[in-house]
Amino acid sequence: MTLLLYVRHHKNPRWWWRPALGAGFCGGFTTYSAFALKIDQYFEAHNYGSALTYAIASILGTYIIVLVTHEALKNKWVKL
């Protein structure tokens, strides 16, 4: 929160500070927590196949989303 307040009130904020610190950095903690909790629930239920499937699907799905987003916005970023 302190970082976001700093960025908001900084005299010359860069455009990437808010999304990088807010959604990117801080949001990563909640996303990872949910991912780890779900994997733990599968392990506690001795459902190892589902845990492995969930982990692979989450990691692979995230990678695919990053690639698609990068390709969709590549031309826009190059023009900046």
Image (cartoon, rainbow, N blue to C red):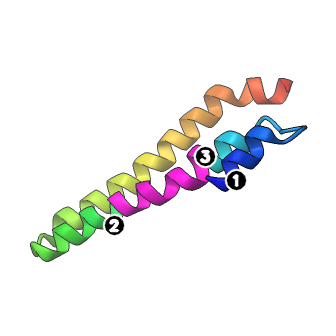
* Amino acid on which disc 2 is placed: Ala
Q: Which mark is residue 71?
A: none
Q: Above or below — where is 22 with respect to 12?
A: below
* Residue at 90% across, 38% down: 12
User: Residues under labels 3 and 1: Cα distance?
Assistant: 8 Å
* Amino acid on which disc 1 is placed: Leu
Residue that lies at the very extreme toward the right in this rendered image: 12
Residue sitting nearer the eye, 22 or 78: 22
> Mark 1 highlights which residue?
3
> Mark 2 highlights which residue?
36
Number of numbered discs on residues: 3
Q: Which mark is residue 22?
A: 3
Instruction: Give coordinates of residue 37: x percent, y percent.
Output: 28, 65
Instruction: Give coordinates of residue 13: x percent, y percent.
Output: 84, 39
Mark 2: which secondary structure? helix
Q: Nearer the viewer, mark 3 or mark 2?
A: 3
User: Residues under labels 3 and 2: Cα distance?
Assistant: 21 Å
Mark 1: which secondary structure? helix
Q: Which of the two discs, 3 and 1, labels the residue nearer the N terminus?
A: 1
**Does 76 sit left or right of 47 as displayed?**
right
Mark 3: which secondary structure? helix
